[in-house]
Image (tube, grey):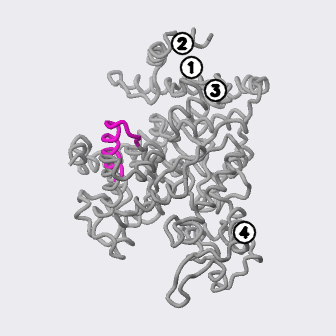
Amino acid sequence: EIAVGLNESLPTLRQFVKDFSRMQQIVDDGSVKSLAHWRLRMLEAKFSIFNAISGSDENLLTELGEHHDFYRTYKVDTHVHMASGMTAESLLQFIIDKVERHPDDVVGHNPVQGVVTLGQLFRNLGIDAASLTVDTLDVQANSSLFERFDYFNMKYCPMGISQLRELFLKTDNAMGGRYFAELIKETFKGMEQSRYTFAENRVSIYGRSATEWARLAGWFDTHGMYHPHNRWMIQIPRTYPQLRASGCVRCFGDLLANVFLPLWEASISPAKDPKLDYLLSHISGFDCVDNESPSDPPLENIIPEHWTHDHNPSYNYWMYFLWVNITALNAFRASRGQSTFTFRPHCGESGALDHLISGFLLADGVAHGIALRNQPSLQYLYFLAQVPLALSPLSNNSLFLDIHVNPFPKLFRRGLRVCLSTDDPLQFHHTKEPLVEEYSIASRIWKLDSTDLCEIARNSVLQSGFPHDVKRAWLGDLYYLSSSAGNVASLSHVSDIRVAFRFEIYHDEVCFLERLQTKVRLRRAMLTLTEEDRVIRSLTGLSRNALRRR
């Protein structure tokens, strides 16, 4: 009843369909495309001029700074899947260690043998663990994966064997996900050692039953999965057709109920399910995942309870109903002083360009977004709204887009709020520090200097779901201000010159648009200087200049 009441204040599906259609008309309009194209080129040119004039000053400030370098800069991997969050070498050594040192671990049961131990399982599969290599594990990407998402999904199965995936990379199995928990903790230890690297790892809730959340919360609590270097995100795969075919759900509404009703119950009465309440306090947001390439059915005005087709609803239908449920739940939890969740789906990796319209209208940020390179109108809108983008060039290079034509460097120079992420280290990375590897390769291919890398890292912290107090410790008390007043260079390792440039260019662009329509006042994604001054004075009692002198 509370959900229904809160939803009354939110856009209905009919309203969303109408707004979505209007957005399609706007971004496809020739005059809008032309304006966006030239303004984006102007933004890129301004960055080049800024670099020519101020680049040497930035480099000098970097050289003079004590302990100011990229390695000592806080960075967050905002898009990584926990089932592939380790490297292939780490997974290999873990498997070999378990088979050699713990062959008597009970890993399952079958009608013939009864109890099955780890050693028996490997003998039944005909696998000699001592002879395993990263190559025989066959989890890393190769040329066969390009535009073949089905082949990519098989890389989650060591040696192509689904039993090994269930045993080592799942939370819900005969061992209660113990091996997966131990493997994750080893991955977290690696982040501890690097000190400045953090992550938001994703685990899945499918919506196949209302008990999924209880099992995940039990796994989280039993194995002590909280870690200060990680915030958890929940990914919801778009697997409705498989769930309906297996009889788990009757309609799309059943899937949504399985995902969200347990969260409402835990939010209304936390004491009734303390384990789920504890898990929710460590979740920063939701993701929606799967292959975007298949053609979408039309976006229809059908309520989820009436979606009983065997095929999937459209991507945009999924996006709306996940967003509206998360938004309603957030409103209730915020009224109770409970934690809330962001919505940061996979969007614009492949498939129809209109997926990015849903991302623009509904998401707090998106993973991938590389399709923006083909749509100047949307790219310009993403700049104006400063929608966070987590790009994974090494992943894209293997699956959908050659790294040399990846839009990341253009998006960065133009001032979109981009960061780098790993996506799937198991498949795409080779070193013990996958996120640093991602930055390192990007810096060499696109000639990014130290200030560029630190700005990208700062963006990752800003768009992450880590708590306010943590961000304050990493970036400074006023980190949420977009001007140089919010930048503490000794923490972010980004020069005030760079931050001031981004701030001025953004507001100059909005002012340009307002001059085109003199009676229109645009809503800005950054506070103006006057608005920031009010915030500074209310919090510190000081003026901007006095604060900077202090």
- The image's mark for residue 4 is none
Q: Are marks 1 and 2 in contact (CB under 8 Å)?
A: yes
Residue 291 x, y percent position in the rendering: 48, 63
Q: CA distance from mark 1 to mark 4?
A: 51 Å
What span is in magenta? 322-340
- The span from disc 2 to disc 3 (Cα, nearest Å) is 18 Å
State the residue position of label 4: 97
Q: Residue at x 26, y 69 (%)?
A: 308
Q: Amino acid at mark 1?
A: Ala
Q: Answer left or right for 216 relative to 432.
A: left
- Label 3 secondary element: helix
Q: Which residue carries the number 3 mark?
A: 498
State the mark number for residue 544: 2
Q: Disc 1 versus disc 2: distance between alpha carbons?
A: 7 Å
In the image, which is nearer the foreground, mark 2 or mark 3? 2
Q: Secondary structure at mark 2?
A: helix
Measured Cα–Cα span from mark 2 to mark 4? 58 Å
Which is nearer the N-term, disc 2 or disc 4? 4
Under mark 2, the amino acid is Arg
Residue at point 57% right, 62% down?
A: 83
Q: Which residue is mark 1?
A: 485
Q: Residues within 10 Å of mark 1 (few under 14, many from 20)?
A: many
Residue 336 is inside the magenta segment = yes
56 relative to 377, above or below: above
Q: Earlier in the sequence, mark 2 or mark 3?
A: 3
Given residues 362 and 31, the one toward you in this image is 362
Which badge, 4 or 3, comes first in the chain's sequence?
4
